[in-house]
Amino acid sequence: MIKKQTKESTSLLRQAVPPDMRQLTELHVHLGGSVPIYRLWEMGIMRGIRGAADSYEEFVRRMHRTNERTENLDQYLEIFDTVELIQAGPDGVRESILIAINGAYRTGGMRQLGPGGEGGDPDPVFEINRLELRFNPMKRTGLMLSRGAVSGLFDADRIIRAACDAVVQSEIAYKGAIQAGLIICFARDLPWEVNRSLAEKIRYWKKSQKKIIGIDLAGPESVLPLDNPGDLERMAEVFDCAGDDLGRTVHVGETPHTSLDTFLATLRALKPQRVAHPVVAARAFWQNNDARGLELLAEMNICCELCVKSNLLTRALDTPEEYGKFIALLDDFGIRYTFSTDSPALQMTTLANEMEFLLEHSAITPEQLLKAFKNAEAASFLRA
Ligand SMILES: [Zn+2]
């Protein structure tokens, strides 16, 4: 009798992940990209948000980050204003965080999702039981409505407090089966005044709210590449104001807007323990045989946060083959790396889906994959 080959029997991921590694840490996920599209639609209706789309189908089409709709980071980010409005305010943030944490646990190990982003795999390969969720509270104040003014409709302090409460509520509900923490993002596309104000709020709230575990810099590199020393100094002051007792990670080097020299200067000025998508270091090596970026990553023992489909969508890396080359290069230089999904809900992806994708394209070996899973656990800002 010929045994029919099912997707199950050919799952390279299931073969690669041993039974004692079925609980994983994911450390690079944005709140704006973590609420499934069908839930965003429902939240938009509930909250009476105007003009999100003319129909559900159009909304799904607009929100879904696909190859056809994104050719660079700026295009990838263009719908986040809408998402941030839907998620704005203490109640919106609280609800979004509960959905995001539950979603990571429930669907992170699924290899496929349904059409609106609902779960679609009855037998997940693993579960995400430690999650670092990042967001910018200032972008949840309704700030975008205020046309250049620096205060939004909602109170940022109450948003931060609601976010921390939502994490605690989730952990209580899961009775310890999931641990989560918040990374607060500064923005390349908000006024300095807003970033400074956010730093002061982090400094205040971290004393009582232990769910704030780190800080990050996110947003379009095209708007604020930090290529001028004055800007970099200002950003370092913002980071320092938040304090050096929080984990530090930075989105830098994802696009051609960041030169290798700016990349190096950014790492030295902001002193992160982790960086997201440092592709410029590899490009400089491939194109100009310039290894300074890779050497500095190794020297500072920085752990790289890689997000496979997001990096392909923004064209930071062009093909799965090039992704494999990138991973191998990091290994050659002894640089640690981890895998995350960035915006799983808007990319309609999961960690399991992306790892299966790498394995199917021979862009990674099972050994590299397991090493990356262990790196995520070790590099997490969550305390054991
Ligand atoms: Zn990111």
Image (tube, rainbow, N blue to C red):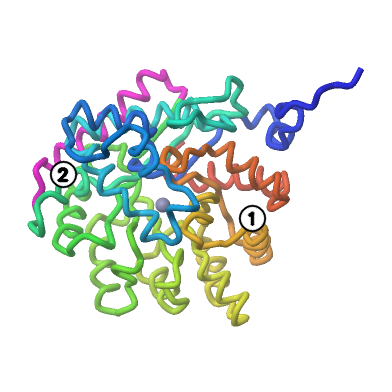
Q: Is residue 149 left or right of residue 238?
A: left
**Residue drawn at (14%, 41%) of the image:** 157
Magenta stretch holds residue 159: yes
- Whole-percent x and y of residue 168? 31, 27
State the SS at label 1.
helix
Q: Is residue 135 left or right of residue 76?
A: left
- Whole-percent x and y of residue 282? 58, 69
Q: Quadrant of the N terminus?
A: top right
* 193 or 46: nearer the viewer: 46
- Examine the rendered structure and indicate whether residue 19 appears above or below residue 139: above
Q: Is residue 222 left or right of residue 122?
A: left
- Where is residue 36, by image quadrant? top left
- Examine the rendered structure and indicate whether residue 284 appears above or below residue 20: below
Magenta stretch holds residue 253: no
Q: Which residue is mark 1?
A: 320
State the SS at label 2.
loop
**Residue drawn at (46%, 64%) of the image:** 254
Bounds of the magenta segment = 150-177
* 42 or 190: nearer the viewer: 42
- Examine the rendered structure and indicate whether residue 62 appears above or below residue 111: below
Amino acid of disc 1: Pro
Residue 15 seen in the current view: yes
Task: Name, please, the residue furthest toward the right.
Answer: 1
Amino acid of disc 2: Thr
Q: Which residue is mark 2?
A: 141
* 300 or 119: nearer the viewer: 119
- Examine the rendered structure and indicate whether residue 127 appears above or below residue 249: above
Image mark for residue 238: none
Q: CA distance from mark 1 to mark 2?
A: 38 Å
